[in-house]
Amino acid sequence: MYSATKNPLSILKHTYGYDQFRGQQAEIIEHLVAGGSSFVLMPTGSGKSLCYQIPALCREGVGVIVSPLIALMQDQITALAQWGIAAGAINSGMSHSNVFQVKQKLESNQLDLLYVAPERLVMPEFLDLLDTVNIALFAIDEAHCVSQWGHDFRPDYTALSFLAERFKGIPRIALTATADRATRKDIIERLKLEKGKTFIGGFDRPNIHYSIVERNNPKKQVHDFIVNNHAGDSGIIYCISRKKVDDMADWLQKKGINALPYHAGMSAEARSANQDLFLREDNIIMVATIAFGMGIDKPDVRYVAHMNIPKSIEAYYQETGRAGRDGLPSNAFMIFGMDDAAMQRSWIENSEAAEIQKRIEHQKLNALLGLCEAAICRRQVLLEYFDDTGEPCGNCDTCDAKPETFDGTIPAQMALSAVYRTGQRFGMVYVVDVLIGKEDDRIIRFGHDQQSTFGIGKESSKPEWQNVFRQLVSRNLLRVDVNEHNGIKITDKGFAFLKKKESIHFRKITEKAKESKKKNSRRTKVALDLDEDKSLYENLKSARQKMAKTRRVPAYVIFHDKTLIELAKAKPQSLDEMLEINGIGESKLKKFGQTLLDVILAS
């Protein structure tokens, strides 16, 4: 299937400049090169793209990459060119002449990779073109878009199931960083990957410090967070509306901070210009709605701040995953207010989505609120949500300083008992009404006013009980079954809790956050550990920036910061020695090696 000269490890070393694969990369690549199809779930920044790029280089023909974002295809193609990889795209944003040129390269076997949007892929004319060329594989990126259970469902993705029939024998790989169990199952079924192999690489991003604070003067909270932790760093601030984006960007600019706005209400030219500046320059903050971000490969984003809660844990995980893609210490900082939840619920109810979709979105929002209200390690809650596990991380705010809690053992027992005695088929609102003893026609009709749990929780308010239920869900003692009208069910862990009569503590949520005299988050400035080598590192960064500007590409496309750090420490004395540095392959050595070597030798 591939020759010795196209050995995956050889390509990794000579093209990409790395000595060994990470995690499950080697197994995934070997499976795909051999002609097998697969579903791959790996965290952001773990090297998913190599899992299809290297097999496409090993196998005969072109790798066809399905990507949802036309705007970012050219950035990916530009980055691949620096490695000496021939990539092209065909999309609606291109001129007829450019499309014609790419088609010519495709038909003459001059492309290693071809990027297309799902809408383009399903066009009869484009499929006829693919029938005439040799295809190495199909890669479906951001595969969660195919699932109605996912946080970013896109109907155009559902048509991709035809690939299994029309292109039999050609391996397919679907990749995502964000998919819970229901979404994973849906992706595999919709893309007909049941006979393929599933690879789940875990969800943990240990370099990210998670912090969630209650709202109290949010502009000042974010400003203090930046000043105390990330002065001079690139970052992203997410706001809930276009108006808030403009307001926050303007406010930060008046504070002397280099902030740019990005939202769908701006002209395409203005959005593109701001995104280009953010990608190419250092020390720029992008203040944006969720219109910005998917597919952003800038590796040195040191923090992502949310001024409002997103709509789901998947959205939160994906958006925070834009920080620290280079593996260096980074921050995820979010401000939380119950008014956010009310607004998100209003949007769900007023949307034109089907009722089952609304139930799914309510369930996902409840899970996110559980994360916000958690008294235990944030990372453990995140991992539990994705059916992953982990020990307390020591790298989140609840690990840094234990939050104010209360003994929730009795309320938890009451809640679980009420769920059990009402048949594990009703939603949270109904079960809470039973606990507080509400005189309700439905409760009387089902006879639940006669149960021992009716009214046993009347000493607590409805919001207090809702807080308990959300934290029980976040701790995986309860789960919400969207297939049964959001009915709450007790998990195996929940039954074990009742049987063993364990104790539990919940986070105390205040009506209004008090002004904290402490800094919002511990300082997480990246420790370069360069000592006397720091001036050389800065000189290498300066040389990289000049080369990037000459080629009109982002600096990280030339080399990542981690490569420059390694260069500053190792101080190679020849081009051959530079090949031992991670991230320096043969193509980049030929283009940029001598310039950086001159800087090192002159130091």
Image (cartoon, helix red, strand yellow):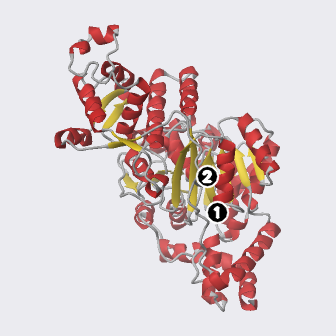
Q: Which mark is residue 200?
A: none
The structure residue drawn at horizontal position 41% and vertical position 46%, both measured from the top left corner, is: 375
Check if mark 1's residue and mark 2's residue have beta carbons within 8 Å.
no
Residue type beneath disc 2? Val
In the image: residue 268, left or right of residue 561:
right
Q: Which residue is mark 2?
A: 304
Residue type beneath disc 1? Asp
Q: Nearer the viewer, residue 518 or 155?
A: 518
Q: Label 1 vs label 2: CA separation?
A: 11 Å
Question: Can you name the residue that lies furthest to the left here?
Answer: 499
* Relative image position of residue 403 (x, y in whole percent): 44, 48
Look at discs 1 and 2 and give the one toward the viewer. 2
Quarter the C terminus occupies = bottom right
* Relative image position of residue 280 (x, y in whole percent): 75, 61
The structure residue drawn at horizontal position 36% and vertical position 47%, both measured from the top left corner, is: 387
* Relative image position of residue 60 (x, y in whole percent): 53, 63
In the image: residue 325, left or right of residue 395:
right
Q: Is residue 464 above or below residue 373?
A: above
In the image: residue 110, left or right of residue 502:
right
In the image: residue 554, left or right of residue 294:
right
Label 2 CA crowd tier, 10 Å (few <14, some 14–19, many 20+) = many
The structure residue drawn at horizontal position 49% and vertical position 51%, both measured from the top left corner, is: 177
Q: Which mark is residue 300?
A: 1
* Relative image position of residue 32 (x, y in whole percent): 44, 60
Q: Is residue 298 visible?
A: no
Quarter the N terminus occupies = bottom left
Q: Secondary structure at mark 1?
A: loop
Q: Secondary structure at mark 2?
A: strand
Q: Is residue 7 visible?
A: yes
Quadrant of the rendered structure where residue 247 is? top right
Quadrant of the rendered structure where residue 324 is? bottom right
